[in-house]
Amino acid sequence: MAAEHTRRLPLHPSLTKPMLVAGGEREATFALWFVCLSIPVLVSLWFIPVGLIVGGVGQSFLRTLAKHDPQSFGVVRRHWSQQSVYLGGASAYAPVQYKAPKEQTQSAASGGVLKALANLMRKNK
């Protein structure tokens, strides 16, 4: 009976598929090819074949990496940005963030006020 009333929600493939360009992660692919094609322009045009070879090898590496984990560079970027927050292990030089609370004792003033109130209450009875 419950199966007859289930709702189906169609998901567009663009919401579930990773954003890949030429089989590699989008940002990493653009960064790789930008570097590989801008170095020959800035240095010397004789480096164009070297840039294309490095770009091809790098692109095959990005494709292999994207097959295993299509969001690997995002994970690495978050790891690097949060590395100072989440230390890999215990350290003797780690900052102490927790301080044990001090034992609460009654101060002389509050004890004296309470005693005086208790004596007044006894006298009223």
Image (cartoon, rainbow, N blue to C red):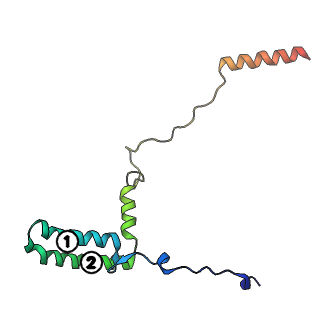
> Where residue 20 sits in the image (x, y, percent)?
37, 77
Q: Would residue 11 appear left or right of 107 to someone viewing this image?
A: left
Q: Are marks 2 and 1 in contact (CB under 8 Å)?
A: no
Residue 36 circle label: 1
Q: Residue at x 82, y 15 (%)?
A: 119
User: Going 88% across and 14% down the picture, which residue do you hit?
Assistant: 123
Q: Earlier in the sequence, mark 2 or mark 1?
A: 1
Q: Position of residue 59 (x, y in %)?
A: 27, 77
Which of the two residues, 84 or 27, is positioned nearer the viewer here? 27
Residue 120 spot, x, y in % from top left: 83, 15
Secondary element at tag 1: helix
Q: In the figure, 32 relative to 96: above or below?
A: below
The type of residue carrying mark 2 is Gln
The quadrant of the image that shows the N terminus is bottom right
What type is the residue that disc 1 sits on?
A: Cys
What residue is pinned by disc 2? 59
Q: Secondary structure at mark 2?
A: helix
Q: Nearer the viewer, mark 2 or mark 1?
A: 1
Question: Quarter of the image holding residue 22?
Answer: bottom left
**Residue closest to the eye, 26 or 90:** 26
